[in-house]
Image: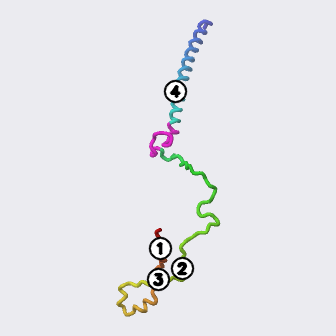
Amino acid sequence: MTNDELIKQLLQQNETLSATVAAQTQLIAQLNQTIQELKEQLNKNSKNSSKPPSSDGFKKPAPKSLRKPSGKKAGGQSGRQGTHLAVVTAPDEIVRHMPSSCEGCPHYQMCKGAACIAEKRHVIDAVVTVM
């Protein structure tokens, strides 16, 4: 091979490689654009786009409350005097309820005295005053 033929061959090879590099550069640019679009699509959810909440799937964003934490524990605070309706140890009235079918029984008085208490109820009469 002569030097002129070798130079022609190298120039032709250089043109081919330059065309290949240009095509690959264009392909890389297209792929980068596609990757960017897919990343943007993945980052969309119902909070930052017009997508419905059902399309979020299992990656739902955490709810963000606008309330600031007070630093206190939940529930009644220490030192607070609680109020409740305590069961009275000495009630005003005790009513024993017997089945109506027992009234005609000859052992009614004996059963009434030793009636088994099935449940206790604490009844309070509420007084409402209107001013």
Please give the name of the residue rendered at 54% of the width and 29% of the height, measured from the top-left corner: 32
- The reply to whether the magenta stretch includes residue 46 is yes
Q: Nearer the viewer, mark 1 or mark 2?
A: 1
Q: Which residue is mark 2?
A: 88
| Kind of residue sitting beneath label 4 | Gln
Q: Nearer the viewer, mark 1 or mark 3?
A: 1
Among the two numbered marks 2 and 3 on one chain, the one whose residue lies closer to the N terminus: 2
How far across and down, in percent of the image, does residue 53 sit? 46, 45
Q: Nearer the viewer, mark 1 or mark 4?
A: 1
Classify 11 as above or below 76.
above
Q: Which residue is mark 3?
A: 117
| Kind of residue sitting beneath label 2 | Val
On-image quarter of the N terminus: top right
Is there a contact, CB below 8 Å, between mark 4 and mark 2?
Answer: no
| Kind of residue sitting beneath label 3 | Ile
How far across and down, in percent of the image, does residue 93 sit? 48, 84
Q: CA distance from mark 2 to mark 3?
A: 17 Å
Q: Which residue is mark 4?
A: 30
Please give the name of the residue rendered at 51% of the width and 35% of the height, measured from the top-left corner: 38
Among the two numbered marks 1 and 4 on one chain, the one whose residue lies closer to the N terminus: 4
Q: Rate crowding at label 1 as few (under 14), some (14 to 19) or many (20 or more) other CA atoms within 10 Å.
A: few
Classify 90 as above or below 67.
below
* Element at label 1: loop
